[in-house]
Every structure is written in C-alpha cells, then in structure tokens.
Amino acid sequence: MNGHYFATGLLCTHLKGNLSKGTLTEEIVDKKSVCRVVCPLHGASFNLGTGDIEDAPALDGFNFYFNLDFNFIESIN
C-alpha cells in the first residue's frame, strides 16, 4: 500500500474472518500514513503497521511480523 508491504496474521481475532478479503484503508495522522485492514465479517479494524486493534468488535490485535517501507529503501539507495 503506497510503497509499504505488511506481513500480518491472516485471521481476524473476533470470529476468524479472512483479512485477505478485507478492505484496506489509509489516512494521514500527524503527518504519517496509517494503514488499516477492516474485517469483512463484522467490521473490526486493525492497524497494519502495528497489528493493534483500532475498532471493535475484535478484542485483541493480530500477529504482526513486519512493515517494509520501499519508499524509504529507495531514498537511501
């Protein structure tokens, strides 16, 4: 998403919805891009950069492995 690649858990922590079928969103918060995935089952929202829960009904974040920013990598090469 805009030069960022995320490795995360596949399933929503609420009812195991498949997050690869979810909606990706992005907004600018404090001059930083915040990317989220919204579960297709009940609308739980997770921060792709941290794995943290952003919106109910899920109660826990998901497994987050890494966030690669290829825009940054290209700028230092």
Image (cartoon, helix red, strand yellow):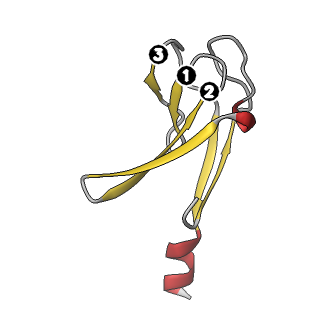
> What is the crowding at mark 2: few (fewer than 14 residues within 10 Å), some, or many (at least 20)?
many
* Mark 2 lies on residue: 39
Disc marking residue 28: none
The residue sitting at 54% across, 34% down in the picture is 51
Judged from this view, the residue extending furthest toward the left is: 30
Q: Secondary structure at mark 1?
A: loop
- Whichever of labels 3 and 2 marks the residue nearer the N terminus, that label is 2
* Mark 3 lies on residue: 56
Which one is nearer the viewer's eye here, 76 or 52? 52
Evaluate if marks 3 and 1 touch, with contact meaning CB atoms under 8 Å apart: no
The residue sitting at 46% across, 50% down in the picture is 26
Marks 2 and 1, how far apart in space? Answer: 5 Å
Percent of width and height locating residue 60: 53, 17
- Relative placement, left or right, of 7 versus 24 is right
* Mark 1 lies on residue: 43
Which one is nearer the viewer's eye here, 33 or 76? 33
Q: Residue type at mark 3?
A: Ala
Marks 3 and 2, how far apart in space? Answer: 10 Å
Q: Residue type at mark 1?
A: Gly
Q: Residue type at mark 2?
A: Cys
* Quadrant in the rendering for residue 65: top right
Percent of width and height locating residue 11: 72, 25
- Whichever of labels 3 and 1 marks the residue nearer the N terminus, that label is 1
Which one is nearer the viewer's eye here, 70 or 28? 28
The residue sitting at 66% across, 22% down in the picture is 12
Q: Which of the two discs, 3 and 1, sits closer to the camera?
A: 1
Quarter of the image with the C terminus in it: bottom right
Quarter of the image with the N terminus in it: bottom right
Percent of width and height locating residue 21: 73, 35
* Quadrant in the rendering for residue 42: top right
Evaluate if marks 2 and 1 touch, with contact meaning CB atoms under 8 Å apart: yes
* Quadrant in the rendering for residue 70: bottom right
